Amino acid sequence: MPRPLATRRTRHRLAADAGLLVVAAAFALPLLWVVLSALDPDADLRVKAPDGLTLDNFDAVLNADVTFTPLLNSFVLCGGATLLTVVCAVLAAYPLSRFRSRLNRPFLLAILFATSLPITAIMVPVYALFVQVNLIDTRQGTILFFAASQLPFAIWLMKNFMDGVPKELEEAAWTDGASSLQSLVRIVLPLMGPGVAVVTVFSFVAMWGNFFVPFMLLLSPDQLPASVSINEFFGNRGMVAYGQLAAFSVVYSTPVILLYVLVARRLGGGFALGGAVKG
């Protein structure tokens, strides 16, 4: 390889590495601020080493009113909506993946269009509808809307993962007398475990961090999730308890981090179906 060409490639690689480091620093600094401020008795907006390590910020937020009740509400809302989203996405993606119809493509394009709708644009009619059907300030109403707003993209993802499962495996089960539902539950879903894990994690994380929907649909303070109650750390006159805010953020982020760690192996497992239909 000519030396000028090798030098040019080296420079390009170093420039790319430098750019990636800058992007990584942009993501790491806010996280570093959260961790350091949670242990700092005099936390502010600066990223700095704590003047002294303390757990007082955690002691101030680890109680039922500030943290435990909102987190429980978040688990109920996001867990219920995620379960509903995954079940509906599987049932909707299965016929789209396994049966050919002239309506498949228009339906998928409509789903893709639905994923691009901004949530703020549809909240006014949704709010009016929920008032009419008495679903305002109810957990079931919020769960339904969470699931409905997340379902289009979940169907799109689930269908793509389901396409990777060979149909020949189901045809063999049908020959043995299995129904479509039985083949879906016993053959397709076990083989597309990574895909189900991806949709589950994506849906749960998107709902867990959603502020606007529960803020609009839930009125009772005792039903608000943690994504809304975090707003209480911002005072009316611009005063912010930065240390307590950071401590709450650490606790609030822990469930989604644990969820990702628990399914990390499934996410990276991929589909080992290359020889499933041989022989």
Image: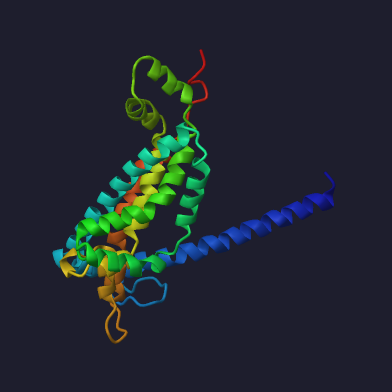
Left or right of 266: which side holds 26? right
What's the colour scheme? Answer: rainbow
Horizontal side, residue 89 vs residue 15: left or right: left
Q: Give the image location of residue 64, x and y in percent.
A: 14, 64
> Can you name the residue that lies furthest to the bottom here?
237
Of residues 199 and 213, the one nearer the viewer is 213
What is the quadrant of the N terminus in the image?
top right
Residue 20, quarter of picture: bottom right
Residue at the top extreme, as displayed: 279
- Residue 91, percent across and down? 36, 38
The answer to whether residue 85 is visible is yes
**Quick one: 68 or 20, which is closer to the camera?**
68
Q: Which residue is at a point 31% across and 49% down the rendered structure image?
A: 82
Q: Residue furthest front?
A: 102
**Above or below, comparing residue 99 to residue 144 in the picture:** above
Hey, which quadrant is residue 61 in on the image? bottom left
Taking the image as drawn, is residue 248 in sight? no
Q: Is residue 25 left or right of residue 121?
A: right
**How many marks do you count on the picture?**
0
Q: Residue at x 46, y 31 (%)?
A: 98
Q: Position of residue 36 (x, y in %)?
A: 36, 67
